[in-house]
Image (cartoon, helix red, strand yellow):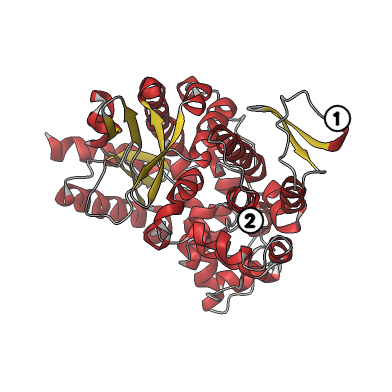
Amino acid sequence: MGRGLEPDQTSGSLMKQKLFRDPVHNIIGWNIEDEVEARIFELISSRTVQRLRRIRQLGFAHLVYHGAEHSRFAHSLGVVHVARRILNALEIHDEDLRFEVLAASILHDVGHGPFSHAIEKVTGIHHETYTQRLVLDSDLTRILESVDHKMPERVARYYGPRGDFAPEHQVFLDIVSSQLDADRLDYILRDGLTTGVKIGVYDFERILSMFEIHRDGEQTRLAVNYRAREAVEGYLIARFHMFKQVYLHKTVRSAEKMLEAVLRRAHDLLKDGHEFSAPLEAHLASLLSGSVLDAQDYVWLDDTDIWVALKKWRDDKDPILSELASSLLDRKLLKTIAIDPNDPVFIARMVDRAEQLALKAGLDPRYFVLLDRAQDTPYKPYDPTQVSASHIPIVTPTGVSPIEDVSDIVHLLGRDAYKVLHLCVPAPIKGQLLEFQARIQA
């Protein structure tokens, strides 16, 4: 097996490559005469990976940032491209290891369902569980086994507990899943570009050029030379602000909570034997009825099924289901009120008042008074009590240290957690709630 060509290399013919024009990375090419890259291209072309074209990367973010229409497929393609560039920068030539890391990268999101966070609240199963199942038993499995009969198990390990990963292979896990992995390196740039949020820009090329392998006994880690410390600081700050401005945006979160509510309402109606005005897609109906779908049935579902269901539910005879579906389709979203997440007594009083006002307005508070909690930690500092910490090691002239020990900015970021708590309520009662909030805070 030969080593694959990077798109910017001049040797070889471009006719031997399958090319993708990417808005972030320009041209992403796969050399189909290279056995490793040919198998990766097979994975890209598989039914399971192609399904990701029908799942938006940012869920409801397009309701706020109308350019955020990109798919999980586009992101996954970017992730495997970044992973390949990291392997090349580290001069990793072992073909089986290269394939293992690239396969884990392109497949890292295959277990995502439509509007993943809302669906996971219904199923109670994290998307990485479905990713492991699909790697071990789907159309992907045959492709992985064509390289090595143990390859499905090797790739599935990347989505399990970090402590189960061999110490000498931690560097490869770092490329796929860490605080400076190919996933984050791509989505920050991609999401920043599509949303138009300029704070999502950081110096990717500088970080890439300064990657190193740090060895400490048997353990290997993905590290960065101290000369790129400022670039890593910029990356972490960009991620922090993307969470504040995009991922945890109040309107995006309101829409996600409303989808959770409408799916919950459909679940409750199914349990009560409700006859819907139009039949549901069979896999979605099974999921909403409380069945745990196997991986093969789960991947039948994508964003299209949710939108079709919402269009059907708009005209359903159940007024709650109809109202919630119509509101999502027409972007008539619940309004949000920011609440101090650290005051449980105040939270309880606000929720109680909101439920009273909803009942008075003839609305069921179970579906129209929604409490949304969310938080993000910009950087998780090194914890020596963890078997395999996922901190970012920085190689300095005097040794290797966690980045928070050599960067005042990251030290501060590591001590911070961005927390938000919003009460999502119908527009007619928001004003009354704000007056109540002002009175009890006076």
Q: Earlier in the sequence, mark 1 or mark 2?
A: 1
> Percent x, y for residue 118?
49, 56
Q: Residue at x 46, y 52 (%)?
A: 169
Q: Amino acid at mark 1?
A: Ser
Q: Quick one: which residue is furthest to the front in this view?
A: 217
Element carrying mark 1 = loop
Q: Give the residue drawn at x 48%, y 66%.
A: 125
| Quadrant location of the C terminus in the rendered image | top left
Q: Nearer the viewer, residue 299 or 36?
A: 36
User: Which residue lies under the disc numbered 2?
Assistant: 306
Q: Position of residue 51 (x, y in %)?
A: 71, 53
The one of 94 and 4 positioned closer to us in this rendering = 94
List the residue tagged with mark 1.
13
Please tell me whether mark 1 or mark 2 is closer to you in this view: 1
Residue 144 at x, y = what percent? Answer: 69, 61
Q: Is residue 408 left or right of residue 166?
A: left
Q: CA distance from mark 1 to mark 2?
A: 43 Å
Local crowd size for mark 2, using a 10 Å CA cut-off: few (<14), some (14–19), many (≥20): some
